[in-house]
Image (cartoon, helix red, strand yellow):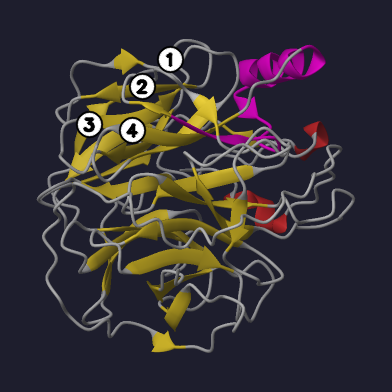
């Protein structure tokens, strides 16, 4: 999800203050009445990749923390259906811009699976078999890395000319799945393999679309001006969760002016949930900050996401992003959205969370333990549900 990753090295100033949400009466770590209907095949094994690192005792949901990558920019790590591998984007091995890699969690072996041309993003395994991968790349437009955006316009990121490709898990037999002018990226797949959801600028906005795994039957499922992106299916394949902006007035004018230049300003995003065709979409955060990277917990009800809601609006430099969990069906608080529970406590960036197919492990990206400014690595932890 070529998303808020550049925030790690950019200077931001947010005008909207965050209203702290009251703490929930019950911990959000466990909701016994909500259980998933998904039955992923899980092959037990020991995660040997990386090395154990010391966790923060306040991070009570994260046990047996391991660091999986070391150095550079590594992010958006997503599980294979059997839980044995991760696909991630990285600038390792001297790459000038992001390429896609597959990390074997048993052996620790990391293999580049993209062509090495252009910039890539949003790698994902095909579900439920893991017999293919998909990712977006700009290589059809140019083998070189796309130019960086004009920072005189403030904090913006470019809508590079991405197309969506499919390949074998080792990167061979690369084929165009969906292309055309503009931006096609942020693609993920339903657990049952029925549909792919992605973000596109094909209709002169940034909207969500779905398609069949072969690239046919493309359907637009959001229709409100603003940015809709970074969508994931629930484990039971009945719902979607994504990030969205809903600009109005001068903010909408700014959004459209930037979009015409192939840019977007992703600094005010809320988390939304809705049905598979975009029906009944509603925000489950309302804090006016940068909320992104949502993913359902195994119960297909709770959502984990990254946010700077606790970062002071006046903070200069890269703001503090933490992971939070919200019950999407919980009662509304004074903000009009359910209460959230903070999961991480690192004074820096934590983001891009995804649960393993069986819900036992959480993978995420973080600046913690970095040795150089902006270094981001991938971590995995055993998820611990709170006791009643």
Label 2: which secondary element = strand
Structural crowding at the residue carrying mark 3, measured as other residues with C-alpha within 10 Å and reported as few (<14), some (14–19) or many (≥20): some
Give the residue displayed 36% in from the left and 21% down from the top. Answer: 209
Name the spot of residue 229 as percent of width and height, x first: 48, 32
Q: Is residue 152 left or right of residue 186?
A: right
Q: Which residue is mark 2?
A: 209
Name the spot of residue 279 as percent of width and height, x first: 39, 17
Q: CA distance from mark 3 to mark 1?
A: 16 Å
Label 4: which secondary element = strand
Q: CA distance from mark 2 to mark 1?
A: 10 Å
- Asked if residue 160 is positioned above or below residue 258 in the image, the reply reads below
Q: Is residue 165 left or right of residue 240?
A: left
Q: Is residue 278 magenta?
A: no
What label does residue 176 carry, if any? 3
**Mark sitting earlier along the chain (1/4):** 1
**Mark sitting earlier along the chain (3/4):** 3
Structural crowding at the residue carrying mark 2, measured as other residues with C-alpha within 10 Å and reported as few (<14), some (14–19) or many (≥20): many
What label does residue 239 carry, if any? 4
Q: CA distance from mark 2 to mark 4?
A: 14 Å
Of 298 and 212, nearer the camera is 298
Q: Which residue is mark 1?
A: 202
Which residue range is magenta in the image? Answer: 249-273
**Mark sitting earlier along the chain (2/3):** 3
Label 1: which secondary element = loop
Give the residue displayed 50% in from the left and 43% down from the top. Answer: 2
**Mark sitting earlier along the chain (2/1):** 1
Q: CA distance from mark 1 to mark 4?
A: 23 Å
**Mark sitting earlier along the chain (3/1):** 3
């Amino acid at each position: 999800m070529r998303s808020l990753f550049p925030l790690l090295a950019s200077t931001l100033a947010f005008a909207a203050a965050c209203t702290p949400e009251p703490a929930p009466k019950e911990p959000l770590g466990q909701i016994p009445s909500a259980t998933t209907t998904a039955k992923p095949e899980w092959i037990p094994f020991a995660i040997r990749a990386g090395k154990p690192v010391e966790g923060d005792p306040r991070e009570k949901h994260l046990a047996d923390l391991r660091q999986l990558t070391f150095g550079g920019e590594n992010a958006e790590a997503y599980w294979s259906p059997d839980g044995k591998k991760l696909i991630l984007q990285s600038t390792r091995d001297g790459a000038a811009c992001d390429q896609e890699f597959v990390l074997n969690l048993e052996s620790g072996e990391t293999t580049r699976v993209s062509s090495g041309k252009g910039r890539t993003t949003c790698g994902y395994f095909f579900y439920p078999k893991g017999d293919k991968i998909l990712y977006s790349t700009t290589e059809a437009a140019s083998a070189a890395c796309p130019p960086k955006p004009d920072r005189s316009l403030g904090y913006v990121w470019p809508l590079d000319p991405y197309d969506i490709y499919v390949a074998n898990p080792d990167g061979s037999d690369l084929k165009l799945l969906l292309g055309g002018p503009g931006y096609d990226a942020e693609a993920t797949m339903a657990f049952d393999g029925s549909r792919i959801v992605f973000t596109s600028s094909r209709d002169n906005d940034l909207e969500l679309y779905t398609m069949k795994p072969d690239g046919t039957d493309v359907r637009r499922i959001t229709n409100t001006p603003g940015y809709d992106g970074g969508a994931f299916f629930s484990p039971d394949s009945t719902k979607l969760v994504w990030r969205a902006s809903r600009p109005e007035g001068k903010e909408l004018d700014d959004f459209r002016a930037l979009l015409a230049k192939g840019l977007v300003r992703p600094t005010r995003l809320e988390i939304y949930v809705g049905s598979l065709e975009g029906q009944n979409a509603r925000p489950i955060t309302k804090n006016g900050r940068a909320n992104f990277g949502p993913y359902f917990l195994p119960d297909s009800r709770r959502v984990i996401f990254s946010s700077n809601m606790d970062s002071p609006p006046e903070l200069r430099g890269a703001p503090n992003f933490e992971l939070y969990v919200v019950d999407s069906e919980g009662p509304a608080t004074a903000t009009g959205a359910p209460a959230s529970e903070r999961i991480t406590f690192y004074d820096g960036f934590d983001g891009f969370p995804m649960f393993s197919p069986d819900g036992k492990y959480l993978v995420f990206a973080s600046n913690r333990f970095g040795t150089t400014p902006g270094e981001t690595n991938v971590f995995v932890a055993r998820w611990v549900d709170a006791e009643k």
